[in-house]
Image (cartoon, rainbow, N blue to C red):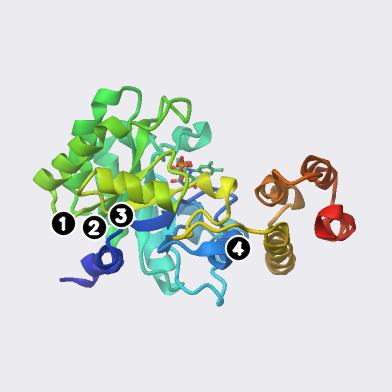
Amino acid sequence: MSDVTNYWQTIAAHAKAENRPFFSLAPMEAVTNAIFRRVVAKAAAPDVFFTEFTNAISVTHPKAKFTVQGRLYVAPEEAHMPVVQLWGNQPEAFEAAAADVKTRGYEAIDLNMGCPDSTVIKNHGGSDLIRNPEDAAAVIAAAKTAGLPVSVKTRLGYSRLDEWPDWLRFLLEQDIPLLTVHLRTKKEMSRVGAHYELIDDIVKLRDEVAPHTLLQLNGDIDNYQDGCALAAAHPGVDGIMIGRGIFTSPFAFEHTPQEHSVKELLGLLNYQLDLYDDFAERFDTQRFASLKRFFKIYVRNQPHAAELRNAMMETHSTDEVRQLLADSPLTK
Ligand SMILES: Cc1cc2nc3c(=O)[nH]c(=O)nc-3n(C[C@H](O)[C@H](O)[C@H](O)COP(=O)(O)O)c2cc1C
């Protein structure tokens, strides 16, 4: 087995030995950076982390270097290199980006072919590739030139659900070690439930076209238990990817659900604040406001939670947040 196949097969085999699918934290822009990945690792780590997506052109673009350094940064304390996710549609850019990320120590590349954002689509990346399969194939081939395993994360179609058999077949024909399917079309955004009714047919297609390609499902799966149940109900599913579930609980990947005290939750928040300060000092690329979307993860459902959260939303620095936490009855 080549190294390229081996990377994902090893992850899948490890999980299979425990009679479960492998679990990934989904790539999420401005969320799954070097800071938050460490928070999730401290709470309960999945098998695989993905970076937020990075424009392939910007990876080697001299003017974009500063922002990209932060985006592609992996802290030495991270136990495993995350999988780096790239977006775009220019093969030359992917060839250069793939070589660059390899020198940074990344061991696997994932290609974004599902993002519905209008700017990304205007630049012919993300889900626009679903409408341009030749570009998708060219980008996959270009990314492979660095010799790292290249996987794809996509949706079921661009505007119609019945696009999925042709589109997924096309991707499966590209000889990729892993295909992650967000079970919705681009047009559906996140407005409808994930199409679990198609899972068995997708497994069948994978078995027919590319039995060596691992299949990972994504969409509306909240936590480890739900992921295990879904995989058990659909034999042939290899991996489960969780995105927004991490906002419901930072312990989403915990194998045995436990009660977590307010102190523990706020401890994680304090950890994130410390990592944020360290990161901001080094890269100066993070805006404090970007931290605010995380507060609801830690401060919820407790008495006085809404009051504290509202006050936190008015803060302007990590020190102000720390002060509020120190003064809150929740920490007494
Ligand atoms: C804030 C946010 C940022 C996202 N950024 C990315 C991204 O950079 N790359 C990507 O492939 N998907 C991105 N997604 C989509 C998620 O990876 C995932 O496919 C989607 O949220 C559905 O999974 P879920 O129901 O488990 O959240 C993003 C989603 C959210 C909510």
Q: Amino acid at mark 1?
A: His
In the image, residue 196 sits, relative to residue 316, either above or below, namely: above
- Residue position marked by numbered label 1 in the rendering: 212
- Residue position marked by numbered label 4 in the rendering: 39
Tag nearer the camera, 4 or 3: 4
Residue 151, label in figure: 3
Element assignment for label 3: strand
Element assignment for label 4: helix
Determine the CA span between mark 3 and mark 1.
13 Å
Tag nearer the camera, 3 or 1: 1
Q: Quadrant of residue 170?
A: top left
The answer to whether mark 2 is within 8 Å of ligand 1 is no
Determine the CA span between mark 2 and mark 4.
28 Å
Q: Amino acid at mark 2?
A: Pro
Q: Amino acid at mark 4?
A: Val
Determine the CA span between mark 4 and mark 3.
25 Å
Q: Earlier in the sequence, mark 4 or mark 3?
A: 4
Element assignment for label 1: loop
- Asked if the residue at tag 4 contacts the one at tag 2, i.e. Cβ–Cβ closer than 8 Å, the answer is no
Residue 255, x across and y down, in percent: 44, 60
Q: Amino acid at mark 3?
A: Ser
Residue 132, x across and y down, in percent: 29, 34
